[in-house]
Image: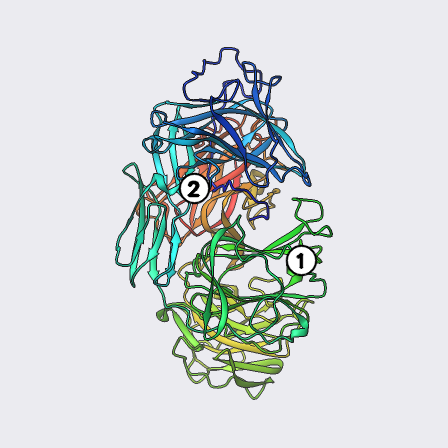
Amino acid sequence: MTARRSTAVAILALLFTAACDSDDGPLSPDLPDVPSEGAVFLDDYAEGLTFQAFADSKVDAVEIDNTETLRGSASLKVTVPGPGDASGFFAGGAFTTNAAWDLSGYDVLTFWARSSKSATLDVAGFGNDNTGTSRYTVESTSLDISGVWRKFYVPIPDPSVLAAETGLFFFAEGHENDEGYTIWFDDIHFDSLGASVVRAAMAGKTLTLEVGATAKVEGLTATVNADGVDVTVSAMPWYFSFESSDESVATVAPDGTISVVGSGTAEITASLGGMAASGSVSISTGAPLSEPAPWPPHDPADVISIFSNAYDDVPVDTWSADWDMADVEDAEIEGDDMKLYTNLVFAGIEFVSQTIDANEMTHFHMDIWTPDATDGGQVFKVKLVDFGANGVWDGGGDDVEHELSFFAPTLNSNEWVSIDVPLSEFANMTTRGHLAQLIISGDLGTVYVDNVYLYKGGPVDAPTTPAPTPTYDAGDVISLFSDPYTDVTVDTWSADWDVADVADGDAGGDPVKIYTGLSFAGIEFTSATIDATGMTHFRMDIWTPDATDAGEVFKVKLVDFGANGVWDGGGDDVEHEITLDASTTPAIGTGSWYVLEIPLSDFTGLTTRGHLAQLIISGDPNTVYVDNVLFFNDVNSPSEAAPTPTHNAADVISFFSDAYTDVTVDTWSASWDNADVEDVTVVGDSVKKYTNLVFAGIEFTSATVDATSMTHFRFDFWTPDATDAGQVFKVKLVDFGADGAFDGGDDVEHEITLDASSTPALATGSWVSYDVPLSDFTGLTTRAHLAQLIISGDPNTVFLDNIYLRK
């Protein structure tokens, strides 16, 4: 989310446009006539139509232009302001009429547009009357416009509800590449093309909420075939019908508001015109918050507090800005004040009237508690915004901002989590003398917030909160030391041959082991060795007050005594040591709990693990708090590497493979996609891991790939998700054509769909190698300028390796 504000809220949707026959030359002079009935703008506004600019937009952005037209005598000219333009942050508004139109006889809005430069129009659609009470808004986002007139379709998901509509067209657009530009619209018109809904969808998610809490159905889309083109648009909840599987647990209103009314579980589903929408919201009830956040330990003289009972707070203008998507209320537990956010998509916390000078501060702190699930890749984001020396937001100039993302195990459900990070991690915050906004967002719909402050100095010398609680099934765990599980016998936590002191301690009420004077410590379980052959990972949580950002390391060694179960200095004894630092995965750090989840396959020298007898920790940190020492079986990650490719390197163009030299890839998750990606290692092999996958854009536009001599596209695929009930995985290749740029008229693409009936079949829990003839991509009629690879489908978590073209 950004600090730019608009009353036009755009929900991400995929858009496909239909252009005129000649997309790179003059228009045909024989365009069909547009009837005046249903016309919003031809050569002038429809009778009674007025333009209302959105709040904070350039009010004089729209004018009638008699020089640039699609045809006829006039078009609508829109001036998009550049950064710092005093007349407005962006261009946008609604074309409304006081005399409502009956649109029930139409099924699509069409319009033509061109621009003074290639750009991406943020949003356009209908049903927004600029009152804030619109029920039937439909919008398309990320519209590719250029110097050539193109026709766009915004279909009506259900015309029957539009018998009296006053919002006939709207748009919103901001500057691009730090400069303004011009857009022209023409022939804005409602039409009847026999459009039909082919798909409906809602964002699927799982929520754990308290009784009395509310949430919103989100991500409602309709895919409609209009004039032979499938167009996907975002639509408001009023177009849909909702149903709860158990109304004694959760009810859902026509506006998509889910209310939790009783304990249990319920599933919320939707339909559009009788067609079931894909996706659902799973609701389960959790225990309400019953304890306050940890009391902050820092000296008040070193703190700038935004919200905390422990300190005096600076002025805050709002805890939920008028441009955000969240509800906030004050809450109190055992005399401790906190903020409760519900329906949280993104929330703007502003202190604009008195900005904060944080130049002397070194850290940011926030405590959060959520009942929502956090173990499925959910993210919580924190953004800081500095308005620069002029102390005002102008969309550019000296404004700076940076956003950090937090996932499990930093996040955890039903317990207080302390986000305590150095301000240096907000890398783009090159100034912080005029902090004016804190923006929180992410997947957690319900969040309690407390102890929001900045402070100077290092973190405290001991943890004040417990380590994240493991959530693995007990049947998949062998625990040496962890409260949620029954521990096996450990003979000693500091052997007589080591150099370390150990004591039992406490962190936030949770037992921990405290190592001081640590050079190396021997943890032995020789009297009853451990058979870890059925386990996939080793876990240990550590917390240290010592420096970890200057090359310091922490080492973990596992030792197996072999079949005879005794150490004899050779024979069948095996061991391996892993070295971790601030840059490894997992990483170590200072002043926070760090969860070290290490695949046992990374201990490559540990060729047997049926008689594990020793764990040895060592390294630079002198003081280390330890918790949750255990082995577990992770059924959600591959336990072995993908097959090593055997094709000759001279016959390969590799995007990602340890076996070859890769070409340049600009991004593995484009800014316009809906997915998260991270680099992981599986048995020493580099792999791309996608989570929250709806669709992911992999781009190599800066150096397009000439694949004319290649014959096949190959990749290895692994997912823990179901694949046997009609689930699909899709792969699309896009060629930008001879001009090497998107939207030049010569772009081509093709998408293939893989499922359990494909050859080879899509499968769960095992690597599947696909070697697809490029001839199967029948729509890819050229491939000399491949620029994009787009993956999508049903699996939420996907591991990919060895992605390349070959001949």
Front in this rendered view, residue 776 or 329: 329
Q: Nearer the viewer, residue 582 or 329?
A: 329
Q: Nearer the viewer, residue 541 or 397?
A: 397
Residue 577 visible in the snapshot = no
- Residue 133 disc label: 2
Mark 1: give few (<14), some (14-19) or many (20+) Cα within 10 Å: many
Q: Name the spot of residue 51 as percent of width and height, x first.
A: 53, 30
Residue at 44% x, 59% y: name it: 446
Q: What percent of the width, then of the height, locates residue 215?
A: 39, 54
Q: Residue furthest top?
A: 30
| Residue 752 percent location from the top left of the image | 42, 36
Residue 36 drawn above or below residue 293: above
Q: Quadrant of residue 536?
A: bottom left
Q: CA distance from mark 1 to mark 2?
A: 33 Å
Give the secondary structure at mark 1.
loop
Which residue is the extreme one toward the right?
389
The residue that disc 1 covers is 355
Task: Mark yes or no: residue 96 visible.
Answer: yes
Q: Amino acid at mark 2?
A: Thr
Q: Is residue 608 left or right of residue 654?
A: left
Q: Which mark is in front, 1 or 2?
A: 2
Type of amino acid under label 1:
Thr
Q: Is residue 240 above or below residue 634?
A: above
Instruction: Name the disc covering residue 329, or none.
Output: none
Q: Position of residue 679 (x, y in %)?
A: 54, 54
